[in-house]
Amino acid sequence: MALVEEAYKVIDHIKFGILSPQEIRRLSVVEIQTADTYDEDGAAIPSGLMDSRLGVLEPGQRCKTCSNTSVNCPGHFGRIELAVPVIHVEFAEIIYNLLQVICRNCGRILLPEKTTKSLRARMERLKKMLGNVPSLFYSRVFEEAKKNHECPWCGTKQYKIEFTKPTIFHEYTEEGGSQRLSASMIRERFERVPDEDLELLGFDPKHARPEWMIIQVLPVPPVYVRPSIT
Ligand SMILES: [Zn+2]
Ligand SMILES: [Zn+2]
């Protein structure tokens, strides 16, 4: 008699984050470089959207990554390297809020050092007392930082930011003109924000750095999980 032993695990917690470009590249088995799928003979075009390193669909075919047939191959992710970064539309509102509370020059939070120190102490106390920090704490930090029109860290004057849906951002300069902020410019600003400032704004920088809200690399799902279009 065959015995089947099953192992059970209890899930302690689930954490959601944003995939970094490095993580997407690490998970990827192939860089997709052409939008084509099959050649005239019906074979998958290498580096195309159906590249057999992503997994296979037909019985009898073998996956070029794990050598399994479609039944046993779990499917593998690929990636597309974007020519220019793109703002992830889902995060546009968060990007807008963050742009207004960090310095456009040095990337620091627009609050004096003394204030950040006492806020950090309060945050630690709340964590100890309640187990987590209420979202009201972070919205107050945002409100406070938004009031500053000059960076307390480097003295740079801050300009008004305007957000037009879905993903357009303009900055109004002193002379009354406006400048469109490209996705790359926003990315560069976010890269400068130190982890400790992000924590005061409710970010978990280990799992969700703000520059990851602007996509540089697009994950390509395995063929196996894509919806059928026939
Ligand atoms: Zn495979
Ligand atoms: Zn500054």
Image (spheres, rainbow, N blue to C red):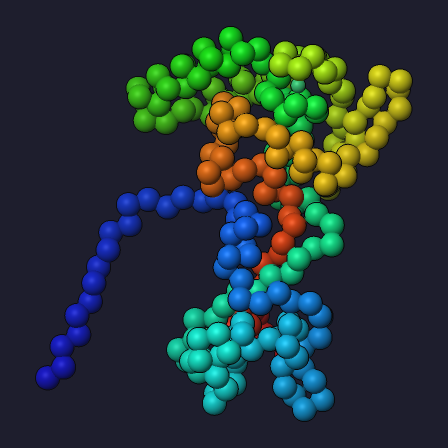
At a point 47% along the width and 41% down the height, the residue shown is 207
How far from the left and from the top, in percent, is residue 204? 47, 34
How far from the left and from the top, in percent, is residue 157? 74, 15
Of residues 83 and 169, the one drawn nearer to the viewer in this rendering: 83
Of residues 23 and 169, the one drawn nearer to the viewer in this rendering: 23
The image quarter in which residue 223 lies: bottom right
Is residue 138 in view?
Answer: yes
At a point 58% along the width and 67% down the height, the residue shown is 30
Location of the N terminus (image quadrant): bottom left
The image quarter in which residue 191 lies: top right
In-image side of 222 versus 161 (left or right): left
Of all residues, the one furthest to the top in this rendering is: 114
Location of the C terminus (image quadrant): bottom right
In the image, is residue 188 above or below residue 106?
Answer: below
Of all residues, the one furthest to the left in this rendering is: 1
The image quarter in which residue 40 lies: bottom right
